[in-house]
Image (tube, rainbow, N blue to C red):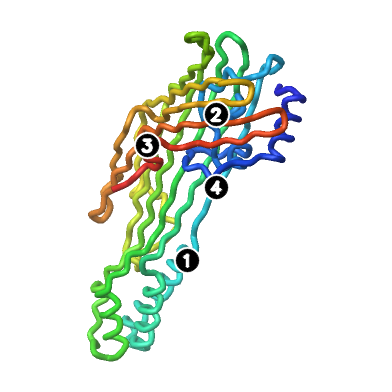
Amino acid sequence: MMKKNHITRTIIASAVLFSFNAAAATSYFEARNDAMGGTGVASSHYGVAPLANPALLTKHNSNDDFSLLLPSVGAQVADPNDVSNKADDVKDDWDLFDSAVDNQHGVQQAAANLKHRLQEFRNINADAQVGVSAVAAMANDTLPFALMVKSYGTVSVNGKVNDADLDYLDKVANGTITDVDKNALTSRAFGRAAVITDVGISFAKELETAGQKWSLGVTPKYQRVDLFNYNVTVRDYDKDDFDGDKYHNTKNGFNADIGAYTDLNDNWTVGLVAQNIIPRSIDTKVVNGFKETFKVRPQATAGVSWHNDLFTTALDVDLTPARHCCK
């Protein structure tokens, strides 16, 4: 198990951590690194090295033998406009409008209410990231290694309201249009999500060049990508359908991370890591004429840390675009 004296030092250090607001983006959640602003390329504990920089597996104390991280869970949500509830409100008012048209009663008021809801729903967006990971690391002086399982997902939900729909509903509400065509309304709700799951084994080796000791680490990994392309007209919106087979596809493959670090002296450490060194492009299912392309991009990050027994500060900087993308 992780030795008590190391745990004590980690707790003390975490209490006085300072981190610069790093420009680096991570694809995992872990309490200590998150507390340091998401840094970790040069400052991670060896027990989470496969998540941040596999070379750091060699950066263990002589009395360390085993570390278990089980599990680490985190999430970030940005939903200032309460998209999910607004989408439900639009659907509720659509159903009332649909019923009013069928019954030829209260159509103008129902149209006005639906227009108001659509105005609230237009061009709003919600984003979320969620991750879970587990690591079992074995420390030794010959070839330290670790088993790693990690899932990291991103979700985006937004509404696309057509100006023509608002104009049409306005004319229904003021009585200009009396023969209502419900199919004339084409505003849509979109939900996109990608979940990357990695299962890998990390190895690291200490080397020496011109008298300078440094470590090299690598994580070959099986990689599964789950994509969701949910898009429907607002009349058909149902959040429970988001993960349905109609909108979901999966692509399996292999990838790898590689990293290095060196101690410049007793206090300064520098590191470099490249994650997902094999680029991948994966198409979503074509749904209602819409398709996205999700790209897993190689991501290189450099890091530096200063540390002593009680204090650690770190800075990570992305050297390549930090985000996967859809287009």
Q: Is residue 156 left or right of residue 7?
A: left
Question: Upstream in the sequence, badge 1 or badge 2?
Answer: 2
Q: Can you say which quadrant of the picture contains the N terminus?
A: top right
Query: As rendered, which of 319 and 258 lies closer to the eye?
Result: 319
Q: Where does label 3 land, which residue?
A: 320
Q: Neighbour class for label 1 at 10 Å: few (<14), some, many (≥20)?
A: few
Measuring 30% from the left and 81% from the top, which residue is drawn there?
169
Query: As rendered, which of 28 and 121 lies closer to the eye?
Result: 28
Amino acid type of the residue that numbered disc 2 sits on in the rendered structure? Ala
Question: Upstream in the sequence, badge 2 or badge 3?
Answer: 2
Does the CB distance between marks 3 and 4 fall below 8 Å? no
Q: Where does label 4 land, which residue?
A: 75
Does the CB distance between marks 2 and 3 fall below 8 Å? no
Q: CA distance from mark 3 to mark 4?
A: 24 Å
Q: Is residue 42 above or below residue 16?
A: above
Disc marking residue 81: 1
Does the CB distance between marks 1 and 4 fall below 8 Å? no
Question: Upstream in the sequence, badge 1 or badge 4?
Answer: 4
Q: Classify mark 1: helix, strand or loop.
A: loop
Image x and y of residue 204, in percent: 52, 16
